[in-house]
Image: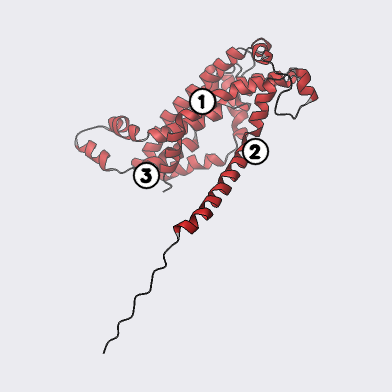
Amino acid sequence: MATTQAPTPVPVRDEAAAAPTNRVRTTVVVVLLLAVSFVVLLPFLWMLSASVRTAGDFGAHPSALLPHAFTFRNYVSIWSAIPIGRMLLNTTIFAVVVTAGSVLFDSMAGYALARFDFPGKKVVFLVIISTLMLPFQATLIPIFKLLTDIGWVNTYQGLIVPRLADAFGIFFMRQFFISLPQDLEQAARIDGAGEFRIFARIMAPLAVPAFLTISLFNLLANWNDLLWPLVLTNSTSMQTLTVGLSLFKGQHATDYGLLMTGSLLALLPMVVAFLLVQRRFVEGIATTGVK
């Protein structure tokens, strides 16, 4: 006679008992995140504090976060100390045009490497990737010599043209396009659409998160770049803000209030840009496959 085995009782989780443990764990995580955030933001808080302090207050209390003598004089004086308006314009033109051009050329090259089959495709991709291991300083002198020979030193085109495409952007866009299904492209080809139309009307709208990600990377890199504009420009009318601030520090090494004010003004546009695209930026990073 067969015997039936009684089912093993499933333990019932006591939600009421687990709730205090979860609250403690959540509290600890929140406190740790707040502490890490404070450490990360500490330099920016000090920069903000230094920009609204007098020179005497800064000299007496250089490490204090809260100003003892509050003033907005630095925000008025910075405009006459250096041509910050012109430098902001130069920085904006340089960073924005390079960003727009790199998004266009990187996306087209990445799409071609992801979707087209042509002789030497793998070799071309390996050569592009290999340039990531080449330091920028190694090519700086040859590029400067070339730009000098064609008369592009101290010009917008000299600043912009050599930066209009980069290996990382091509690699990033290639990986993004590989992760997209090919059904829409095939359907468009059946309907008679050409490759440029497929790229512009179908693939580009799908790649908006990747475009914004590459845009933010390029905008931040070129906005904060010091070495390239420093080498390519030799007049105040063409200098970017980073170059102006570095030279300004050399001329007025003791006036850190003005220096921090200029640094804060240079930082604010990038903070605003990140806040505007942060959601799509995270989406672009998350949806880019590595295949």
Q: Which residue is mark 1?
A: 272
Which residue matches tag 3?
A: 179
Q: Quadrant of residue 56?
A: top right
How far is the residue under mark 3 from the one under mark 2?
37 Å
Left/right placement of residue 78 relative to residue 21 reads: right
Say what secondary structure mark 3 lies in. helix
Is residue 232 something one can see in this rendering? no
Specify the amino acid type for callout 1.
Val
Q: Position of residue 99 (x, y in %)?
A: 48, 26
Residue type indicated by callout 3 = Ser
* Quadrant that contains the N terminus: bottom left
- Looking at the picture, tell me which residue is in the foreground, 198 or 28: 28
Label 1 and label 2: CA atoms lie apart by 21 Å
Q: Earlier in the sequence, mark 1 or mark 2?
A: 2
- Outermost residue, right side: 60
Label 2: which secondary element: helix
Q: Residues within 10 Å of mark 3 (few under 14, many from 20)?
A: some
Which of the two discs, 3 and 2, labels the residue nearer the N terminus?
A: 2
Query: Of discs 1 and 2, which sits in the foreground?
Result: 2
- Coordinates of residue 48 in the picture (x, y in percent): 65, 25
Q: Which mark is residue 39?
A: 2
Query: Judging from the image, what secondary structure is the residue with disc 1 in?
Result: helix
Crowdedness near tag 2: few (<14), some (14–19) or many (≥20) residues, C-alpha within 10 Å: few
Q: Nearer the viewer, mark 3 or mark 1?
A: 1
Residue type, numbered disc 2:
Val
Q: Earlier in the sequence, mark 3 or mark 1?
A: 3
Residue shown at 55%/15% (left/top)? 89
The residue at the far front in this view is 16
